[in-house]
Image (tube, rainbow, N blue to C red):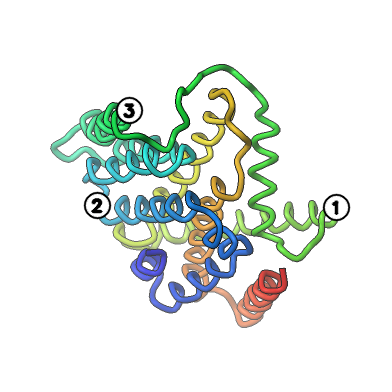
Amino acid sequence: MALVVVDVVGGPVVAVLTVIAVLLLPDFLPLHRTSLLGPPLLTTTVAMLAVMLAAPRFSLAYGAVAAVGAVWVSPAGTGLVLAAVGWALWQPRNGRGGAQRAWLAVLPTAVAMPVGMLVGTAWATPVRFGWRGGLDHVLTAMGGELGAQLVPAIPSGALRWFMVADTTLILLALVAVGWQQAAATASPERPRRFYPAAALLIGSLVAGLLARSMLIVGTPLPDTEDVFPLAVLATLVVAISASVLWPRWRWWGKGIALVLLLGWIGAAVMG
């Protein structure tokens, strides 16, 4: 699915390299070997992105994917519903208002919740709501999981912190420039639509994880299963950004990018 999404946006070469990078993420194989929730959540998230890109006005479709992910796959997918509503409101009004699209996006979840009470859901019952706080602990847990994918071969300590911080700033700059370049030159059906969809999906997943951890009693901190879809989405965004900017880089810039990629692959394999 990631291959198809990136192929449509950036071409076959970038798609193949992106899938290799996803497969080499340090927790990909352990997660798929031992987890019953992580792989389905990841599949649902990538499917959500694909439907958002292919049918941005078909809010009932990606709303249904979000409902399945949030109700029956994993509580960590709660943010998918937020992404469905946000993407419905994002679309230009063309014969149907944004509020109507948003209602259609949330309708499958409204149906799935009572049905889930009868046939079972992924949520542990009874669900008890209560303010727990701990925003810093939740963000630290999420950042630790993402950092493990970003700099896999560096042990814990000050060096790891600086490497994660510096690499994050570099990647954010790459994504920002790539988004700007895509918005200026690409057709609406290609990278221009990809960036807001991916950003909304990532932000909504983060918001869902924060809300679940801080508002529902007994919820553990986000773990690899919960955070791994964010790592895969970030990998897709970075790959698309590099493909958008690649023709504009000089030979030495391309060389640096290849060295960094090979270094990360080596660290991921060794880790």
Residue 140, percent across and down? 70, 40
How dense is the environment of label 2, judged by Cα within 10 Å: few (below 14), some, or many (20 and up)? few
Question: Mark 1 sits on what residue?
Answer: 157
Kind of residue at disc 1 = Gly
Q: Nearer the viewer, residue 265 or 198?
A: 265
Question: Mark 2 sits on what residue?
Answer: 55
Kind of residue at disc 2 = Ala
**Between disc 1 and disc 2, whose residue precedes?**
2
State which mark lies toward you, 1 or 2: 1
Q: Is residue 143 visible?
A: yes
Kind of residue at disc 3 = Met
Q: For the point 43% across and 60% down, which residue is it?
A: 182
Q: Distance from label 3 to label 2 (Cα)?
A: 30 Å
Residue 22, percent across and down? 53, 66
Secondary structure beneath dot 1 equals loop
Secondary structure beneath dot 2 equals loop
Q: Image quadrant for the N terminus?
A: bottom left
Question: Mark 3 sits on what residue?
Answer: 117
Farthest residue to the front: give it.
119
Q: For the point 44% across and 37% down, which residue is it?
A: 79
Q: Distance from label 1 to label 2 (Cα)?
A: 45 Å
